[in-house]
Image: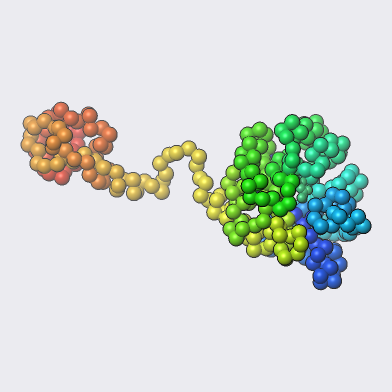
C-alpha cells in the first residue's frame, strides 16, 4: 500500500534539535521549532518528526541531563501540527508513552515507533489501534522481533506500516550502515514499503540517503538542523543537504526505468542505423552461389540481419547483384 503521495518521502527528524538554536539565539523553543518546520517546507522535505517524551528517550547530549524534559506543551505541539498542515507537511510524532498518544492523536498524521520501543508491544498495540500510518523503526532488532511488532499492528487491523531500517549507533559509521538490509527487509516484508532513518555524517552528495533510495527505501528520514556545528548535530541534514537528496532522488527516479531488458523507443532510430545487414562484398553474377566469400555485413540494419546468414548461404543469385548492395530474399532462389 502506498502510504504517501510522493516518493521518496523525505522526513526531517526535528526531534529536540530546536534546543541549541533556541538557547544560542535566546528564542523560545516553540519559535525555533516553528522555524525548523518552515525551513523543512522550503527545502523539499515532506514530513517532520518530533520525539515527544522525556529525557531518557533521547540519544543526544541531553540524555545525560536528568532535568531536561521535553519543553513544548501539548498545546504548542498542536499549534505546530496546524502549522505543518498549512505548509503541506505531514506531522509525525514518536511518542514515548500512551498518554502522549492520547493527548496528540487528533493532530498526528503518522506515528513513528522508535527502535527503543520495538519490543514495547503494549505501546505498539495502543498506537496501532489509532489506525494511522506507522513507521516502525527496526534498529538493533532481529527478524523475529520485527515480525512480532508487525503482527501486533496487524492484529489491530492496521496495515499502514512502513518498516524502517536504521542503526542504533550515533553517528553511524559508514561500515555500520548496512544498507543492504533495506533489500532484505523488502524481501521479508513484501506487503509493506521500507524506509531508512539515517544517522551517518552526510557527505557532500548525500550519497547514503540516495543509495538507500536506490536500494528500495521509499521513506528517508534524517535529523534536521540549521547548524551542523552544534554538538550532536553533525549527523543531521541541513537545508542544502535536503535539497541535494531531493534532486538526486528525482534523478534516480528518472534513470531507473524498466527492470526487464528490452529495446527502447528512444533507441529505434539509432538501432536501425547502427545494426548491420547482409550486403554483396563484390559484384555477384546471376547463378552464382552465395557463400562467405561474396557477402559482407554493413550498416544500416534495414536488410537481412547477419543472424540469418545461414538462411542464404548455399542459395543461388537469381540476378546480378552489384558490390555493396543489400541482399534481399527475392534476389535468391
Ligand atoms: C529514536 C531514534 O532512533 P530510531 O530511528 O532507531 O528509532 C532516533 O534516533 O531518532
Q: Nearer the viewer, residue 278 or 18?
A: 18
In this picture, residue 151 sits left or right of residue 264: right
> Picture coordinates of residue 58 (x, y %)?
82, 52
Name the one closer to the observer, 42 or 95: 95
Classify residue 229 by image quadrant.
bottom right
Considering every residue shown, the one lying at the far bottom of the view is 25
What is the x, y in percent for residue 9?
Answer: 67, 50
Residue 86 seen in render: no
Quadrant in which the N terminus is drawn? top right
Residue 119 location (% of width, % of height): 81, 36
For the C terminus, give its image quadrant. top left
Look at 66% across and 46% down and name the residue there: 176
The answer to whether residue 96 is above or below residue 184 is below
Number of numbered discs overlaid on the protein picture? 0
Give the answer, above or below, for where 53 lies relative to 32: above
Locate residue 23, reporting x and y percent.
Answer: 84, 68
The colour scheme is rainbow
Amino acid at each position: 500500500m502506498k502510504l504517501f503521495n510522493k516518493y521518496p518521502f523525505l522526513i526531517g527528524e526535528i526531534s529536540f534539535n530546536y534546543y541549541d538554536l533556541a538557547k544560542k539565539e535566546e528564542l523560545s523553543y516553540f519559535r525555533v521549532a516553528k522555524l525548523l518546520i518552515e525551513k523543512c517546507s522550503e527545502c523539499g522535505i515532506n514530513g517532520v518528526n518530533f520525539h515527544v517524551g522525556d529525557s531518557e528517550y533521547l540519544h543526544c547530549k541531553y540524555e545525560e541531563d536528568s532535568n531536561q524534559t521535553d519543553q513544548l506543551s501539548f498545546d504548542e505541539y498542536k499549534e505546530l501540527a496546524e502549522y505543518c498542515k498549512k505548509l503541506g507537511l505531514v506531522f509525525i510524532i514518536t511518542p514515548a508513552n500512551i498518554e502522549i498518544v492520547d493527548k496528540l492523536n487528533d493532530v498526528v498524521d503518522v506515528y513513528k515507533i522508535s527502535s527503543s520501543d520495538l519490543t514495547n508491544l503494549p505501546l505498539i498495540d495502543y498506537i496501532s489501534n489509532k489506525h494511522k500510518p506507522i513507521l516502525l523503526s527496526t534498529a538493533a532488532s532481529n527478524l523475529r522481533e520485527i515480525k512480532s511488532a508487525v503482527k501486533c499492528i496487524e492484529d489491530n487491523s492496521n496495515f499502514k506500516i512502513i518498516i524502517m531500517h536504521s542503526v542504533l549507533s550515533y553517528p553511524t559509521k559508514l561500515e555500520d550502515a548496512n544498507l543492504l538490509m533495506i533489500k532484505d527487509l523488502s524481501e521479508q516484508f513484501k506487503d509493506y514499503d521500507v524506509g531508512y532513518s539515517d544517522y551517518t555524517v552526510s557527505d557532500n552528495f548525500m550519497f547514503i540517503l540516495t543509495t538507500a533510495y536506490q536500494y528500495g527505501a521509499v521513506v528517508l528520514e534524517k535529523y534536521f538542523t540549521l547548524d551542523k556545528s552544534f554538538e550532536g548535530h553533525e549527523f543531521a541534514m541541513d537545508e542544502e543537504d535536503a535539497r541535494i537528496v531531493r534532486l538526486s532522488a528525482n534523478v534516480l527516479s528518472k534513470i531507473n526505468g524498466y527492470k526487464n531488458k528490452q529495446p527502447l523507443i528512444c533507441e529505434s532510430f539509432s538501432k536501425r542505423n547502427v545494426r548491420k545487414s547482409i550486403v554483396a562484398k563484390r559484384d555477384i553474377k546471376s547463378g552464382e552461389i552465395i557463400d562467405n566469400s561474396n557477402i559482407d555485413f554493413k550498416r544500416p540494419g534495414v536488410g537481412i540481419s547477419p543472424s540469418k546468414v545461414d538462411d542464404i548461404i548455399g542459395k543461388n543469385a537469381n540476378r546480378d547483384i552489384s558490390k555493396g548492395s543489400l541482399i534481399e530474399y527475392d534476389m535468391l532462389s
